[in-house]
Structure formats: structure tokens, C-alpha cells
Amino acid sequence: MIAALSERALILAPSGRDAAIAAALLAEAGLSAVISRTLPDLVNELAEGAGFAILTEEALHTANLQPLAQWLEAQPDWSDFPFVLLTQKGGGLERNPAARRFLDTLGNVTFLERPFHPTTLVSLAQSALRGRRRQYEARARLDDLHRGATKYRSLFESIEAGFCIITIVFDDNGQPVDYIFEEANPAFERQTGLSIDQGKSMRSMGTTPSQHWLDIYGKVATTRQPVRMEDHAEALGDVWVDVYAFPVGECDAAQVAVLFNDISARRAMELALRESEERLRALNETLEHRVIERTSALEKAQAALRQSQKLESMGQLTGGVAHDFNNLLTPIVGSLDILQRRGVGTDRERRLIDGAIQSAERARTLVQRLLAFARRQPLQATAIDLAALIRNLAGLITSTCGPRIWLAIDIDEHLPSARADANQIEMALLNLAVNARDAMPDGGKLTISAIEEHVSDGHSADLAEGDYIHVRIADTGLGMDAKTRAKAIEPFFTTKGVGQGTGLGLSMVHGLAAQLGGGLTIESAPGAGTTVHLWLPVTSAVCDQSPPIPMPAEPRVQRGTALLVDDEPLVRTSTADMLIELGYRVIEATCAEDALSRLEQAGVVELLVTDHLMPGMTGTDLAATIKLRSPDTRVLIISGYAEVDGISPDMQRLAKPFKQSDLALSIERL
């Protein structure tokens, strides 16, 4: 074993046979130990590597602690070397004020009052070694961070310790008021119960950060000095955490890395150990009785510790999942669309094709709902006339709800424009109307109202101060109890029967509102109906009154050469068939480099249709390169990812999956 990862114990106990006895006890527990005669010898052994050290109080009283303090100060950021200090009286600062000097010098120290039971020493030694092993794990994984992004991601997601990188937000007076999550591993989300959105602040996620932690992290960011502490975190469910915060990045970045573990089990074990010792002293019974009780307490504490380490992880929706699903759907939707338009097959076969198309459309809608909940769907947020949208939607809502539901519309006459995506808002209102209908099996009243409302800080929906349009969707249905209401916006939660709902309706609306800068709350009680409150930000922009570009019944036949680039063969094949039917001569390429090579042979092309994210050069970079050679070449980006990062706003984009009519319309708009 190399010195840097040594697990041996160092013992400094110059009086009597303390050192030999301690070494023997550790040996019986399977732990190797080295006895140091003097403090300088101990420092030299520390330089060779060790897992922990056991010291006696009298060995430090008159010794020069400066060399030891210098060694501790020179530790790397990952290291916090553990000590077990055997004291003559008092276990800690409460009963032994003189221990303050040793605490300030040693830092990570556990006090053990003599006399003690051998099992206590062995237990504390094993606990210290486990802590050291976790430091070794952290050190090994931190080293891996410098070997590449792939290894970093594997470390980031696999360590049991919660880890995040945050950027501290200061107000004009230099006081920390919020922090933004740059990174957070799954263990962090499991232990905190928070669902982290990268680039979002605590307040924007609907959680007010504790000023206590803001002050600690703010000090680390400004002083560039790491902090290690154990604290009681009531906000995380009455738990104890071991927190190590250290600065990262440039000095002016105000970024802090936070590494922490839930040590509630360890604290409970330590408390159980202390209580057990007091009981043993008070009982003053036979040694056999004390050993039995002590062993029982240790077994229970260790069982609780093992149980606390068995955490389950929840899978997270990512853009990559949506990308793969959309790539699978694209050739299915495209091929079925071509077969339907050509009218191939018998009547029965055409009905089968129609059914397959409807299933594919439902799958595409499901992906959109998942992306809406995850706040990663591509939105076209513009100024919309929400009053007109609701009135135009009233007929569809009435027919959807049926004759037993009475629909009432109450909209302010002077309602301003809202900043939103009209198509997504229509889908959200329809989802809410369907939920209301299902909550009124015997009929009832559905009221949709909208007013302008000014919101101040501290609003129940955690909205930023400003002007909003407040939309209320109220029904007179069955209502929900508090437990159901609390879980209503969770994905896949539904009170409907099997096959009667996806459980994504409310979660989609909630995610959409948050993505648009608004909010959603639910007010309900059993027998009193349900009211969903939806807030959308007001905008001063003028609504676009221009009619949409009409799509001809039959796509217009084009002329020219199209260069098609996609790394997915099935997507490339189906898209090529669509372009050929539109009249193009198609040149297919598997990547940007292949496309440039084929372009050298083909010369000028009239149209470039390319995937965005591919191995090597991206689609936008390829488009820029081709534009330099041929400025008249039209460019259409097709992508299965929800994100639009890296795609210029003025560049036409078509989301996968798509039909030939969608492709033709996008080309018409170029």
C-alpha cells in the first residue's frame, strides 16, 4: 500500500504501557499500528502516511506543537487527518476547557476520557479509519477530475457523499443573498431532497436559502479559506451533516464547492455510546453485565449506521433521453406519413397506418409533457392575447367536457398581453379542463377567469416581484385532501384508474409555468372542489396579429440539390425520402466532415438540412462553414434535443420527430 493511502494507526503515549496496550487492542481488531516515542517521531511517521493517530493528553502538554500544526496546515484540501485524544478527565470542551488548545491545533479530534472500555477505543479507531477512507476516496476521485470530463462525470454521479458547486450571489452591500447551482451530484439530491436545475438559484427553485449557510459560503467565497464543520440541519429533516466547503475557480468567480455527508447515524451512535457509558458507570455491576449491555448498544448503533447508508436513487429525465426517443420516432413518423399520403394498401392496411400514426403522435406528445415537467422543452415565448386565446378555446373545452359541465368564462376587459407560448398554454388549459371534468363525474361548473395582478416578494408561488396575469381554473368537483394535493404536481402521480391518465398533466403545466417565469399553486379540499392558480408574466410587447403561413394541401415541388447530414441512418433515410418527394436531389452524409468532403465533389447545393449535435463538428458550425463558401445556400437545422444552446436565433430549426408537411413548411420559411 502506498504511503499516501496508508491505513496504519500511529500511537503517541509515552507514559507507562499505554502505547503497547493500545497497539495490542488495535491488532486484535485487525488494525496495524506504529508506536512513536516522541512528537517529532510522530510527525515523521505522518509524512510516511497514516490512517489516524491515537494520542494521550500528557504527551502534548509540554511538547512543541508547532511542527505538528505545520504538517496539518500543509494538508491538501481533501485531507482532514483524524485524531483520537485520550484525556485524563472530561471528554470535550464542556468538562475539559483545557482541551480547547488541542482542538484548535488538531482540528479533527475525538476526545476519549480514561478509563474507558477497550471496545470504545476500537470503535472510535474504526470510525476514524472509515472517515480517513472516505477522504482517500474523495482524494482519488478529485484526482480523476483532472483526467477528463468523462471520468469527472462518473465520479460526480457515483460518490456517496453529497457534492455541489455553487456561485454565491451578493447584494449591493456585499451580503450573500442567494446561490446558484452550477453542478450537483445525485447523492446531493438524495440527501437534501432537492431537485436541482443547473444554473438555477435556490430562490428561483422556490426555496429560500438559510442565512446561516449563506453567511458560511459567502465567507469561503470572499476569504478563499476552506471551512469544515458539523452542523444540525433541521431544514433537511432534522439531520446532522459533516460539511466541507472550499473555494474553486478564479478569485472573482465567487464559486464554492460543498462536500457533505449525512452523519446522523454516526452522531446517534456517539450519543448512544455516551449514554451507554453513563449507564455502565451508574450501574456499577459486574463486568460481564456491562460488556453485554455495551455490546448490545454498539450492535444497535452500527445497525442503524448501516441502514442509514442504504439510499435509493431516482432517475432524472435528461435531454439525451428525449434525443434518443425523438430519433427513434422520426423515421416512424416520417415513413408512416409518406405511406398515408400515398394511400398505399387496402382499406384495412390504411386503417392500421392511421392507428400507428395516432400512436406515434401520442408518443411525441408524451415526450413534450416529460420535457415540460423537466423545464427543457423548446418554447416560442412571445406576446400573446390571453383573453382571445381563452375565448377561442371555450368551444373546444365545452365539447371536451360534455353537456353535464357548465363552462363560465370571466376575463378582465383590459387584460394586457402575456409572455408565453400560445400552443403550450392551449395544451395546458385543455389538460386542466380535462382534470376538472374527471373530478366532476356527476356534472358541475367549470370557471376560467383571468385578471391582471401585481405580485410582491413573499408570494405563495415564489414569484419575482412584478405584474402577472392570474388565471384561475376552478371546478365544483370532488376536491383533494392535503396529502393528495401535495403530490399532485409530481410526475406520473395520478388518482385515475390504470390506463386513464399519464400523471403528467399537472406536472407539465407546473413545469411550463416555471419555465415561462410564472408559477402554479393548487387550492383544494375534499368536497369543496379544486382551484388551480396559474400566473404568467405580463409583457409590454405587442401581440403578433399576422396570420400564420398557410400550408398547401400538397407540398410544392422544389428544384435543386439538398445536402442531408445526420449520424442516425434511419433518420437520414426517412428524411431523404421526404426531400426526394419534394423534388430535391439528395446527397447524404453521416457527419459534418463527410458532408464537406461530398460538397467538394458536388459543388454548390441549394439546401443544407443537418442535425445539430453530431460527433465532431456541430450542425451550426457546418452551416457556418458552408455559408462562407456559398452564402446563398439555405440552412435548416433538425434536432432531437430540447435545448437550443449553440443555435443562432435567426437560424430555422425543426424539432424531431416531424412529418413531410412540417419539413416542407420549414423549408418554405427559409
Image (cartoon, rainbow, N blue to C red):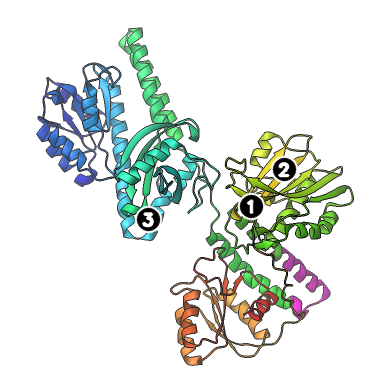
- Secondary structure state at the residue bearing disc 1: helix
Task: Count residues near mark 2 (Cα–Cα under 10 Å), then give few for <14, some for 14-19, many for 20+.
Answer: few
* In the foreground, 252 or 299: 252
Instruction: State which mark lies toward you, 1 or 2.
Output: 1
- Secondary structure state at the residue bearing disc 3: helix
97 left or right, relative to 469 = left
> At x 78% / y 54%, what residue is drawn?
413
Provide residue 151's location: percent of width, then percent of height. Answer: 37, 57
Provide residue 549's location: percent of width, then percent of height. Answer: 72, 76
434 left or right, relative to 194 = right
The residues colored magenta run: 340-360
* In the foreground, 667 or 124: 667
Q: Amino acid at mark 2?
A: Thr
Location of residue 90 (image quadrant): top left
Please, is residue 633 above or below residue 152 in the view? below
Q: Main secondary structure of the magenta part?
A: helix
513 left or right, relative to 125 = right
Q: Amino acid at mark 3?
A: Tyr
Please, is residue 658 above or below residue 490 in the view? below
> At x 76% / y 60%, what residue is drawn?
389
Give the residue pinned by disc 3: 152
* Residue 152 counted in the magenta span: no
Give the residue pinned by disc 2: 495
Give the residue pinned by disc 1: 513
* In the foreground, 144 or 600: 600
Location of residue 271 (image quadrant): top left
